[in-house]
Image (cartoon, rainbow, N blue to C red):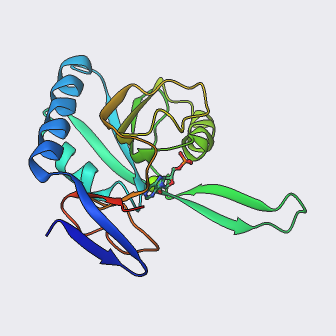
Amino acid sequence: MNKIKILDKEFEVSIKENEIQAAVNKMAVRLNNELKGKEVIFIGILNGSFMFASDLFKQITLDCRITFVKVASYQGTISTGTVKSLIGINENIKGKVVVVLEDIVDSGETLENIISQLKGYEPETILIATFLFKPNAFKKSFKIDYVAIEIPNDFIVGYGLDYDGFGRNLPEIYTLVK
Ligand code: IMP
Ligand code: MG
């Protein structure tokens, strides 16, 4: 199945399952080596990171924990408009090494907001591990410590990523056909 249709748009396969697994495993090897002996807590960002987090975590050999958070957008009562808050952060991360697991970093806006909120919980370090990274779209200056695969500035779906809620179940990455 090389081409698929989701709602009104056509997508074609761009990253195969074996390439995804190899890149995720490679990241796990690095994490296992570089974080040996540390008190690590992985924090997956829902919804998109669930598949990546699951595959990666199975390859992690550290004594560590995992939790998931979600960024909720809602209209505040104040006039500044949309407020984004981190929900579900109930683990104590103070003094620990936090590894944030994200599906994709595009402009970096979402992650910048998450990082600033996590800093309030006083972890020792915050490391960023993303499955996909669009270097040509990135507008921020924070460091991305672990990238599984760099991709061009195209819209993609699959492996947890969606188009209007659909396509998350695809085991491969599909790119929008222009
Ligand atoms: P950013 O804030 O611009 O970095 O965008 C990050 C969020 O936008 C990700 O967590 C995704 O949920 C979503 N996103 C960015 N690019 C894509 C894409 O190509 N396909 C699906 N979702 C995307
Ligand atoms: Mg996301």
**Measuring 21% from the left and 20% from the top, which residue is drawn there?**
36
Q: How many marks?
A: 0
Q: Going by the image, does 157 lie left or right of 83?
A: left
Figure quadrant of the C terminus: bottom left
Figure quadrant of the N terminus: bottom left
**Measuring 36% from the left and 40% from the top, which residue is drawn there?**
151
Image-quadrant location for residue 166:
bottom left
| Nearer the observer, 101 or 92 | 101
Q: Going by the image, does 159 lie left or right of 165?
A: left
Residue at the far left in the pictured view = 18
Image-quadrant location for residue 77:
bottom right
Image-quadrant location for residue 150:
top left
Residue at the far right in the pictured view = 79
**Measuring 31% from the left and 77% from the top, which residue is drawn there?**
5
| Nearer the observer, 118 or 127 | 127
Q: Position of residue 31 (x, y in %)?
A: 24, 26
Residue at the far bottom in the pictured view = 7
**Measuring 90% from the left and 62% from the top, which residue is drawn there?**
79
Residue 62 visible at all: no
Residue 136 visible at all: yes
Q: Going by the image, does 35 lie left or right of 60?
A: right
Q: Position of residue 33 (x, y in %)?
A: 18, 19
8 is higher (above) or lower (below) than 102: below
Q: Position of residue 142 (x, y in %)?
A: 56, 26
| Nearer the observer, 14 or 146 | 14
Residue at the far front in the pictured view = 178
Q: Find ligand 2 in the image and state its quadrant.
A: bottom left
